[in-house]
Image (cartoon, rainbow, N blue to C red):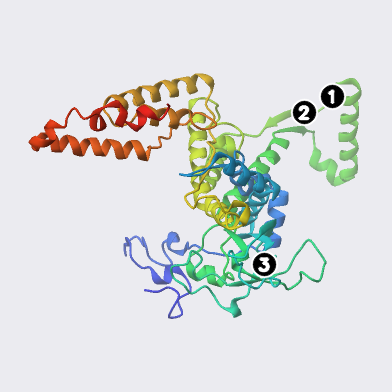
Amino acid sequence: MNIYQNGIKSIKQAIADGWSNVMTGLGKQGRDKRVSAEPEFERMTWQDVDILVASDDMAAKYVEKIPKVGTRKWIYFSGEGLEKKSGEQLLDKMDELHAREVFRQTWIWARQYGAGFVMVDGHDGQIDPAEPLDLNRLQDVTSLTALHRWELYPDVGSGLITDITHPQYGYPQYYILQPHRTTDSKYLGMRIHYSRLIRFDGARLPTRLFVANYYSHDTVLTRVYNPIRNYNTSNDSLATVMQDFRMNWLRMKNISAQLKEKGSPDLINRLQLMSLTRSITNTTILQEGEEIGQMSASLAGVKDVNDAVSNRLVAATGMPHDQVLGDGAKGGLGAEGETENRNFYDQVEEEQKENLKPQIEQLLDILIATPEFSTVPDTIKVNFHSLWQLDEKEIANMHFIQAQADEKNIMNGILDPVEVRKSRFGGDKYSTETVLDTEITAYQEKLAIEGQKAGTDPEAKDKKGDKNVSGASGDPAATKGK
């Protein structure tokens, strides 16, 4: 049943399957409290989001942490035919454009507001930004500007991207600029073609909600709003309890009669006098028939409740304890904390692949279309530097294990020593990635074919001593260094 049709407004009206019991009322509306619980989705306004991020450290950390960690080590390029100098020049160009800072801010805004955009400005012979970016005429990229979804509004009336094979199928073709940080009228209402924008998205919404949300996904704070609210109210309530943890009590003879005859001013004066004498003499002076003491509030079970609320927050954010709460994994900084941090870095790497790499590749496609980088091969790849840093002992152990694996692969004829040397030590730093040499691979395949022929063809056996087949002079690996 489609819950969006036939006047159905809630999930509980559409879903009636599950356990029920007419005797106990289990699963029956009006008798089972669980049946009245249903999920609700309410979009947060950008004002609500701004106030939450500005005032709450947990909300700000959840929005900013992954983009900051994900862009900390930045990127490097690889690929067959890519010269080291070209890769360095590309990184220099990105530094000139402040790409890392712009992409980081845009990623943060996408998580905060639901969408973010990097506006690419360059010389492509077009004056009107509503015209598609012409890569064939692009001479240079001059600037990158970070914008969030409340500065760029979809111009739905101009149509959507209808090509079902396009990466942005179903997204708007044009956006209207409504800048928040400038009053220059030339930018107000500027119409921009999507090809001049690199889009970041926040928490993905189902298609119907995405369309209803003005072709924008949602802030990541919607899903963690309740856990954050519960965590803060729980801690604030605990702080209030601690203020009243110890309370003084006073017992006076005939206090009710005194209040009835003289009223409360005499009692207040007496309490003020007791407080004054205690502050001066560090002694409480009591009259006949008075007693004073202290009582403490019980905090039994408070820790368990607070831990449950904290664990719910950690589970909602998907980040380890020490990243969210700063107290280490489950209150400690031992092996479990290290494991959780490794898992967190794995999570960030997945976020990089999904929410950052496609955007960097889009910028890369634009840059290599310019004359400056026309010689860069299309096979170029974007790679992220490892977030987890090994110590010297771990590095040495990793090198030793890799060397053992390389030795076995060489002995079994899987790899050639030249391939291993170039793969491990041919770049700027040691690498565990193995790159096969096409010349050596072709030569080994030729030897395999000749070997098969030698086993079945008598004439081929007579050529076994031919140095061009099995001799050193025919081995490209043997002659490469000469």
Mark linked to residue 284: 1
> Type of residue at label 2?
Ile
Q: Earlier in the sequence, mark 1 or mark 2?
A: 1
> Type of residue at label 1?
Thr
Which of pointers 3 and 2 indicates the residue nearer the eye?
Answer: 3
Q: Contact (CB < 8 A) between labels 3 and 2?
A: no
Gap in angstroms between the C-alphas marked 1 and 2: 9 Å
- Answer with left or right where residue 190 lies relative to residue 355: right
- The residue at which mark 3 appears reads as 152
Q: Residue at x 46, y 64 (%)?
A: 36
Considering the numbered disc 1 on the image, is that residue within a helix, a strand or a loop? Answer: loop
Q: Residue at x 11, y 34 (%)?
A: 455
Above or below residue 290? Residue 281 is above
Name the image quarter holding residue 70. Answer: top right
Q: Contact (CB < 8 A) between labels 1 and 2?
A: yes
Q: Residue at x 39, y 23 (%)?
A: 403
Q: Callout 1: 10 Å neighbours few (<14), some, many (20+)? A: some
Considering the numbered disc 2 on the image, is that residue within a helix, a strand or a loop? Answer: strand
Q: Callout 2: 10 Å neighbours few (<14), some, many (20+)? A: few
Mark linked to residue 292: 2
Relative image position of residue 390 (x, y in whole percent): 52, 26
Q: Is residue 354 visible?
A: yes
Relative image position of residue 279 (x, y in whole percent): 88, 25
- Answer with left or right where residue 5 lies relative to residue 127: left
Q: Callout 3: 10 Å neighbours few (<14), some, many (20+)? A: many
Considering the numbered disc 3 on the image, is that residue within a helix, a strand or a loop? Answer: strand
Relative image position of residue 359 (x, y in whole percent): 56, 55
